[in-house]
Amino acid sequence: MIELRLFREEKSRVIEGLKKKNIPNESLVLVEKIVEKDDERKKIQTDLDGLLSESKQISNSVGSLLKAGKIEEANDVKSRIVDLKNKISELQLSLSSAIQDLEDMVIQLPNIPHTSVPLGKHAEDNEVYKLSEDFMPKFDAPVLPHWELAEKYDLISFKDGVLLTGSGFPVYKGKGARLERALVNFFIDEAVNAGYLEIQPPLLVNAETARATGQLPDKEGQMYHCQIDDFYLIPTAEVPLTNLYRDRIIQAKDFPIMLTGYTPCFRREAGSYGADVKGLNRLHQFDKIEIVRIEHPDHSYEALEKMISHVESLLVKLELPYRILRLCGGDMSFSSALTFDFETYSAAQERWLEVSSVSNFETFQTNRMKLRFKDEDGKSRLAHTLNGSALALARIVATLLENHQTPEGIKIPAALQPYTGFTIIN
RNA sequence: GGUGGGGUGGGUGAGUGGCUUAAACCAACAGUUUGCUAAACUGUCGUACUGGAAACGGUACCGGGGGUUCGAAUCCCCCCUCCACCGCCA
């Protein structure tokens, strides 16, 4: 949620930012409405506090009267207080409805993009921030897509997944399973070596947790829901990791907070179809190593740079071609202020696949989850949150198989060999 | 799942309807004293909303949510959670 104070203090920046995110014009009028509603809320609050103060005093006087034995006077006062009580409960109702109205409006607005975010509406408008073709493969013979390689070497069975659950739930077998496990361990080790604290969180979270990081209410339909217990399967480790600090006030010296976690991620992906969901391209369950940082507002963009270098180093060690995109206003997620997407080139599919997304949310998440810190003056301020995938497994497996295929088999990059225990899949 | 006992500012912990404006102690911070450390003394010491230029005020919050009452940390109901025992179990 955008901080309420920004609607007053930096209204033009808010409006410009929202325009950059291409929100519909009818939503822009919300900015004015929010300020008006907030004025209304303040007025009610003040009036209510006055009445409460009055009623408190009167109640205390009843106590004194009774003590003094003046029963009739006490009863008299009691009867006079009824009117006041009615007014109070009336105001309490309008206060809570004003607060609700206000939140309903603010929650509809996306985060304000960083000044460096390019204008644009679609994926085509994203800026190519960096292109690395050092490991772009050259093939003489025709190349196989990963789903055919997976079958050829008996690494992954999509059919068995359908048998057990349904489409989008692949079964990894033999060296395929080992490769998956090797990548998980490799990515965790790399993150831990970079200073991140390894966390193993629950895979099911309650509704409050899902709300704090913004999955609810916007993405309700994208999560699997266990209705009996009202738990949600996590769509990313970001949800439990960031929520570890929900509703906390930390000390400035505790920055930076750096967390990493490996979890399976569960996504319903309602509405996806075609080439997008072929093979490992888009799954209902996939493994991902997430990195999360909680930062001082003055240093969050430096932190973003560090996260980008970290993800980049992983792709280099895996000897994959990649590019980094700076997402345009229209393609960014709802809650992000600045996002860089990482894509690796799929040699057989001849297209780029997104394998990581690194974002700074500034105070958008911390405002909702009340994650604050004490600044130098002892005041509490909202911290900044950032997160990124480092990395998402399934598509990495897809491009590893495709890009490193040779007539002899699939070569394992040197950095990964200590983890797989083999150097080639044949 | 069953029964019983708990949940109070950073920590310990008092508080069974109105001298509570949540005591006291510890920790922390600032100052005084001091060659340094320590000690002693003094002060500060929660969060949020809100009035005010400021000084300084008001309100809410004792696990969460409802209720009773003029008045609730305190009484009643529901839920969460921790502990102990029982049952079940990798």
Image (cartoon, coloured by chain):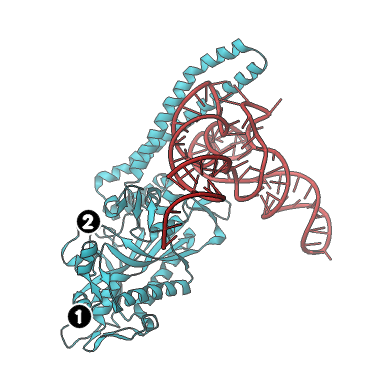
Chain colours: A cyan, B red
Alpha carbons under labels 2 and 1: distance apart:
30 Å
Comparing A141 with A409, the one in front is A409
Q: Classify A1 as above or below B75.
A: below
* In the rendered image, residues at marks 2 and 1 fall on the same chain: yes
Do the numbered discs 2 and 1 sit on residues whose CB atoms are within 8 Å? no
Please tell me whether mark 2 sits on a helix, a strand or a loop: loop
Q: What's the chain of the residue with tag 2? A: A
What percent of the width, then of the height, locates residue A88? 46, 25
Quadrant housing residue A349: bottom left
Question: Label 1 belongs to which residue?
Answer: A152
Q: What residue type is labelled 2?
A: Ala
Q: Residue A269 carries which label?
A: none
Question: Label 2 belongs to which residue?
Answer: A270
- Which sits earlier in the primary sequence, circle 2 or circle 1? 1
Q: Tag 1: Cα neighbours inside 10 Å, few (<14), some, or many (≥20)?
A: few
What percent of the width, then of the height, locates residue A116? 35, 63
| Residue A120 appears left or right of B45 | left
| Residue B9 appears left or right of A239 | right
Residue A52 visible (yes or no): yes
Taking the spot 55% from the left edge, 58% from the top edge, the residue there is A252
Q: Nearer the viewer, mark 2 or mark 1?
A: 1
